[in-house]
Amino acid sequence: MSRSFRTDVMLAAVVIAAMVWLPDSRAQEAKALHLTGDFAGTHDPSIGREGNKYYVFATGFAPGGGQFAIRCSDNLTEWKLCGRVFDEIPSWIHEASPGTKELWAPDISYFNGRYHLYYAYSLFGVNTSGIALATNETLDPQSPRYRWKDEGLVLRSTATDDFNAIDPNIVLDSNGQPWLSLGSFWSGIKMRKIDPATGKLSDTDTRTYALAGRRPPEQPEPAKPGLPPDWQAIEAPFVVHHDGYYYLFVSFDLCCRGLKSSYRTMVGRSRQVTGPYVDREGVPMLQGGGTSLLVGNQRWLGPGGESVLQRTEGDLIVFHAYDAATGKPALQISTLAWKDGWPHAALATTGEAK
């Protein structure tokens, strides 16, 4: 599950913070940032920026109640809890999915003069799922204009579909047209065109585009009862436009299993937003391709659920990983270094999710 990028085009009024200690996106080496404060417990982080403040939205229950905790920072390293999106799950979701107790994979974007927070509701291991939308004029909780508006359902999947409508992400193409990527397990990552005026699905292009999937091994293990087979594990799509290419970031393998989490972040690219995406070796992502970007180490396991923040002063990738001592998730941030047309990121080797 997963999480969303901000571009400077989206935020014409952005105030560029002077942070000379951060290398820019052309740096030769990626750098993992050392985080402090309220960064533990963050899952599927999606990062947005308004003015000189950064906001991270995360899956699930917010401390103190409600859904989608919001964490704030002025400098990307010191984080504090600063609110939540919903006090409770919208009533229509309870009716559509009575078993849903928490909401997943928020994705923050900005277009058509408003912030758009796409998110998912579902139950673990099923594809009877939905993607919904909330909007706001501002991310600043101190503003009198701050109010999250429930915009309702965007897209759903049923047991008869071959995809899973979770893990939404919005990308604006080179013409400013929004596209929604989504998907988890089953037949993989999909994309739909979005009407920028409504934030809902386009009624002029109703095609579902296939972007990426996994290939079965020669001798796949049988699926666990009531769950899709592990070999199908691809989710958390995130698309960015950089230097003439669209880059599709995804998470391979398994999240949400504490010390047994095996998430790893992969990437491919395409000249067109709808694909075809290929990895660095030219293997199509629809055939299981993907270039490795982040893998676990002895300190942090299962890095994934990623989102990217594009900035003039250097791009960042935000993701979660699991503490190798406790299995608890925590926020992670790395600068992105672009080399030979491909992104590179770093995973911290210290720190603790308390």
Image: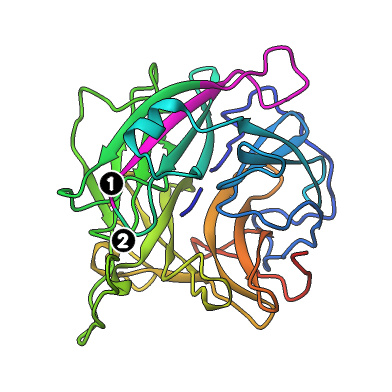
Crowding at label 2, few (<14), some or many (≥20) Cα neighbours within 10 Å? many
Asked where in the image residue 302 lies, by quadrant, the reply is: bottom right
Outermost residue toward the top in this view = 144
Q: Residue 245: where, in percent of width, then height?
A: 41, 50
> What is the number of the mark on residue 279?
none
Q: Residue furthest left?
A: 160
Q: Secondary structure at mark 2?
A: loop
Q: Residues within 10 Å of mark 1 (few under 14, many from 20)?
A: many
Is 40 covered by the magenta stretch?
no
Q: How is the image coloured?
A: rainbow
Residue bearing the label numbered 2: 185
Determine which quarter of the picture holds residue 172.
top left
Residue 294 image-quadrant placement:
bottom right
- Residues at discs 2 and 1 in contact (Cβ within 8 Å): no
Picture disc at residue 128? 1
The answer to which of 10 and 320 lies nearer the viewer is: 320
Q: Which residues are magenta?
A: 127-149
Q: Residue at x 30, y 64 (%)?
A: 285
State left or right for residue 61 relative to residue 235.
right
User: Which residue is more in the foreground, 214 or 127?
Assistant: 127
Residue 169 visible in this rendered orientation of the protein:
no
First in sequence: mark 2 vs mark 1: 1
Pick out the residue farthest to the bottom.
Answer: 219
Q: Is residue 73 visible?
A: yes
The x, y position of residue 50, in whole percent, is 69, 30
What amino acid type should be assigned to the residue bearing mark 1?
Thr
Q: Is residue 266 above or below residue 176?
A: below
